[in-house]
């Protein structure tokens, strides 16, 4: 029997998917033991449906992102020595999930994935000694024609909260931009020291640029980016009490904003956790926005210097002329040989130019970009090695 059901369509209104959580018995390694999303697809606006299409989360065909999200040390904690082959580990999903469809008609499934417990369909919720987080994590699973991609969205500290007779799990949800090119995920988690249940939840969020496969990063006040989600209720009225949050199906494009941000509407219940049957008030978490710089490799946030930057031997100058009309040039200085890729994003974070990785020798390398095919506006060029990304802003007149 399905545990949850969702329906979603692409922006074209033609390509759509139905998803349920259940066990169809088609994933051999976890048959009779684990739940996973099962999908049906339509390409004619819902007149006909094809499926079921099982989401493979265990076994040799499982996405690498799931098979490898636990370290060897964590597997030793769970199974002892020797650890089992990763293809033989049973994974299961939580009961809650959400479904969205991107601009290319591909489904995105937001769900918590973890190791199956001792009993069938149970969930391992204990904490890893190595990481101080659960042996589970929120994921975005997206089906790309013949295979699945799994994006780990962040760590997870707690799973379920109990409020009187009501329980609440992580309540993971998806919003998207109107064009379906960006996905935004929210979930509830409690990170208070000593609290073992999800009874003091904050709303955590992560974004995905579907076209470039870039997950959003958190920028701290010193201008450093971190590969982790953002706590959007930290230091707000909702901090530690964002009960039963709900995220809009779409984000709002911040037209008129100098950084063309995405405003993500989120509400929560202001309630007495000891008596959830009492009067509640729904409150809106205001002023949270995603900016293009949240998606790693676009450009630094306001207040971070855009002058010459030098990270671990990779030095990139500002471009000149700036503003420019046809061509602009900047220099890349390397202390050692390395592969570099260069790309250009527009102000909405969409990649408009990409140079594949090439090997560069130590020294100074001038790079000239031909911007004549692109309309006037603000653009951001990024130079990336395997370890660092350095970004600058340029204006096309």
Image (spheres, rainbow, N blue to C red):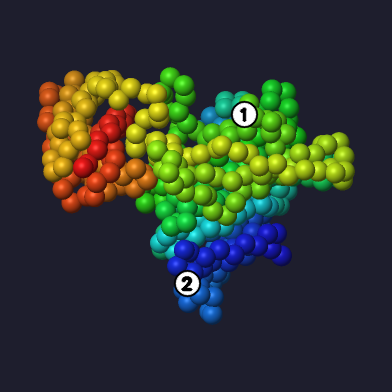
**In the shown orientation, is residue 91 left or right of residue 227?**
right
Mark earlier in primary sequence (1, 2): 2
Q: Residue furthest bottom?
A: 47
Identify the residue at horizontal 65%, vertical 30% (top origin).
Answer: 236
Where, quadrant-wise, is the N terminus in this rendering? Answer: bottom right
Residue drawn at (43%, 44%), measured in percent from left and top? 256
| The C terminus, quarter of image | top left
Answer left or right for 324 relative to 101: left
Q: Does residue 229 lie above or below 108 as drawn?
A: above
Q: Depth check: 205 or 5 in front?
A: 205
Residue position for label 1: 234
Mark seen at residue 14: 2
Residue at the spot x=43%, y=57% of the render? Answer: 179
Graded by Cα atoms within 10 Å as few (under 14), some (14 to 19) or many (20 or more), the crowding at tag 1 reads few
> Left or right of 383: which side holds 43?
right
Q: Is residue 314 above or below residue 267?
A: above
Residue 139: x and y, percent? 54, 46
Q: Nearer the viewer, residue 37 or 34?
A: 37
Q: Position of residue 77 (x, y in %)?
A: 61, 31
- Residue 189 in picture, x, y percent from top left: 65, 36
Q: Which quadrant holds residue 393?
A: top left
The reply to whether residue 49 is visible in this rendering is: no
């Amino acid at each position: 029997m399905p545990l949850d059901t969702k329906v979603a369509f692409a922006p074209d209104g033609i390509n759509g998917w139905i998803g349920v959580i259940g066990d169809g018995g088609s994933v051999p390694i976890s048959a009779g033991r684990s739940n996973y999303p099962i999908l049906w697809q339509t390409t004619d606006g819902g007149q006909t449906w094809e499926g079921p299409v099982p989401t493979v989360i265990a076994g040799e065909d499982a996405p690498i992102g799931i098979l490898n999200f636990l370290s060897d040390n964590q597997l030793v904690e769970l199974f002892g020595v020797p650890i089992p082959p990763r293809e033989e580990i049973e994974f299961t999903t939580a009961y809650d999930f959400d479904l969205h469809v991107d601009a290319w008609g591909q489904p995105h499934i937001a769900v918590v994935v973890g190791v199956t417990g001792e009993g069938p369909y149970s969930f391992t919720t204990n904490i890893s000694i190595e990481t101080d987080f659960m042996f589970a994590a929120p994921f975005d699973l997206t089906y790309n024609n013949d295979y699945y991609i799994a994006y780990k969205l962040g760590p997870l500290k707690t799973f379920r909260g109990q409020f009187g007779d009501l329980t609440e799990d992580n309540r993971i949800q998806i919003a998207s931009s109107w064009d379906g090119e960006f996905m935004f995920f929210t979930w509830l988690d409690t990170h208070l020291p000593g609290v073992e249940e999800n009874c003091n939840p904050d709303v955590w969020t992560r974004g995905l640029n579907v076209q470039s496969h870039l997950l959003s990063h958190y920028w701290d006040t010193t201008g450093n980016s971190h590969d982790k989600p953002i706590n959007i209720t930290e230091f707000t009225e909702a901090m530690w009490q964002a009960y039963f949050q709900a995220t809009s199906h779409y984000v709002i494009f911040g037209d008129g904003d100098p950084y063309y941000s995405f405003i993500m509407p989120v509400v929560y219940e202001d309630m007495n956790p000891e008596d959830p049957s009492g009067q509640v008030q729904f409150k809106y978490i205001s002023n949270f926005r995603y900016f293009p710089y949240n998606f790693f490799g676009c450009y630094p946030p306001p207040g971070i210097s855009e002058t010459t930057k030098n990270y671990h031997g990779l030095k990139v100058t500002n471009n000149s002329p700036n503003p420019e009309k046809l061509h602009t040039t900047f220099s890349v200085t390397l202390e050692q040989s390395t592969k570099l890729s260069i790309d250009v994003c527009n102000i909405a974070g969409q990649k408009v130019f990409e140079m594949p990785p090439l090997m560069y020798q130590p020294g100074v390398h001038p790079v000239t970009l031909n911007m004549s095919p692109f309309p006037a506006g603000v653009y951001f060029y990024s130079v990336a090695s395997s370890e660092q990304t350095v970004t600058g802003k340029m204006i096309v007149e």
